[in-house]
Image (tube, rainbow, N blue to C red):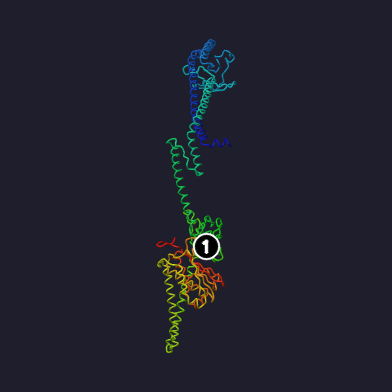
Amino acid sequence: MSVLRVFRSIQAKLILMVLMLILIAVQLIGVYFISTMKSSLIDSFTRNLDGNANVLTKLSEPALSQLSKSENAKTDVSEELNALAGSLSSISGAEIQVLDAGGKVLATSKPSQPSIIGRKNTSMLVSRALQGIRENEEEIIDSDNIRKKVIVKPVFSGTKTVGVVYIMASMKDLYQTVERINRIFVSAILIALGLTALLGVLLAGTITAPIKALTRQVAEVAEGRFDQRVPVLGTDEIGQLSAAFNDMTDRLSEALAINEEEKEKISSILTNMSDGVLATDELGRVIIVNRRAEELLGDDSCEGRTLSEALNIEKAPIARTLQGEETRLTIRRSAEEEDDGEVLVRVTLTPIRSRDKGVAGVIAVLHDVTEAEKLEQSRREFVANVSHELRTPLTTIKSYAEALDDGAKEEPELAGRFVGVIRSETERMIRLVSDLLHLSRFDSRRAQLRREMTDLSEMLEEVVDRFSFQLRQKDIMATIDVAPNLNTVWLDRDGIDQVLDNLVSNAIKYTLEGGTILISAAGNGAGQLVIAVRDTGIGIPKKDLERIFDRFYRVDKARSRNMGGTGLGLSIAREIVRAHGGTISLDSEVGIGSVVTVTLPIVQEGSEPA
């Protein structure tokens, strides 16, 4: 396996490619060269042999012509021809035979073979030569496995064939020469391949070294490290690639930094949004959820669940949104705290569209509309209460006016009582409208405070003096307790007087005869003035404490209305205290009494509360 991995490398492939190209080129050149050389050597050998044959035919022609005319001269001719063949054989190294017109051997260049003289040569080439064919040659392999060249030439005397010259030469030296050249060529190829491999390693290293460096840098970038750079070693293609990769690394680092910054911004926005946000994938599973959504749903394990499970709704709206339709719905859930009642959440489902995939998911935006619904409910109740509060005195005035018109005015005593009721109801309407206008000024922030240096003890005593008649009527004892270090404070005297009048009036109304009321003023150590009105009255049930400062809210509507209240006193008191930058709270227990605490910041003349 390690060997296979080596051959999979670019360096090994380059070396193998170069070696194969060199080998193929040298092989082609070698084959062509050796083939050409072999053909040249054979042609040269054949030409030399053919030349000797032509010389021999010319030299043997007189003797053979003489032999054809007279058989008596055969011995002399044979000797002459033997000498001629022997001399030519010593020059060319070939075996030479001279044959007569009948194909019988007359002379040979090998004295060791006298037995063949007089025997007929049955070679096909001899037969062709005796027929007058001039070009007769072939290559044979003898019994010793030696390749030989045979050339047979006819000898003419005029137009008559008088004999044949037979030459056979060994080609052993020629083929040995070719073999030696082959060995030299193979050796040269091996040496060339070795040098080529060495040079290939060096050359491939110059190519693969930058590629390896580039590969290492790619791995570094893949792991998120962008501080390294690929060395640029030249202006060639690899150098240009290295420079381009370095530029890409810089751009990628910058893009990732920007992307990370944008991601952090989006994450911060999602985390701190007042609305809850959930995002799903194309299958409807939650992949992103912000903190507000977990708070609204009361569940911190939404991620990974389906949106229908997270919202506890049916799957149909989710399916419609995944098909590209925007959907709105409202869900209700119980508050974590029992006193908070029910939480109302408006959900807007919007499809996430992708250019390639169509709808790639769903965005669910959760908006808490509990307070808005409460405000709307309060508005409806306020309108209903105002209508009811106005309708009651108007109905009474109308009834008594009709009674007067019908004749009651003729009876002085009855007419006077009816006019008194009408006046009383009219004053009640005036008080109601006046209180509403007062609240309207606070709602529109048009009410301005007129602060002045106020003596606390004096202000509280005046409040008690204003209610001295009512206190004596019910035999209620009112006590004032002001801390020694609080002599004067900077506040809106008229506004605080109105608050205290309302609180003391309520305390007197709901305190039984013989009860007590304590009005105290002290500092709380945090730079604030605390004024408390404590009574021993009938108290307020716990369920009504939360709404006691709401407009027109009455614990006992019938009794409060009979006592002449409009239901706006505590609401006005709260707005005046808020305008001072303070708070007002009420604590009560049925049958024991109530305490209303007003906390105001202590400010210096010409300054504003912190």
Residue 460 image offset from top left, x and y in percent: 46, 70
Residue shown at the point (41%, 61%) measured from the top left: 607
Name the residue beneath numbered marker 1: 317
Q: Which residue is more in the foreground, 520 or 325?
A: 520
Residue 330 image offset from top left, x and y in percent: 51, 65
Residue 1 image offset from top left, x and y in percent: 58, 37
Q: Amino acid at mark 1?
A: Pro
Q: Which residue is more in the foreground, 345 or 429?
A: 429
Q: Which residue is more in the foreground, 457 or 352?
A: 457
The residue most toward the front is: 484
Residue 317 shows in the view: yes
Q: Helix, strand, or loop for circle 1?
A: helix
Against 528, residue 93 (above or below) is above
Against 358, residue 371 (above or below) is below
Against 49, residue 594 (above or below) is below
Total labels: the figure holds: 1
Dot 1 surroundings within 10 Å: few (below 14), some, or many (20 or more)?
A: some
Point out the image quarter for the C terminus: bottom left
Against 24, residue 417 (above or below) is below
Residue 531 shows in the view: no
Q: Quadrant of residue 301?
A: bottom right
Residue 229 image offset from top left, x and y in percent: 46, 39
Q: Which residue is more in the foreground, 589 or 6?
A: 589
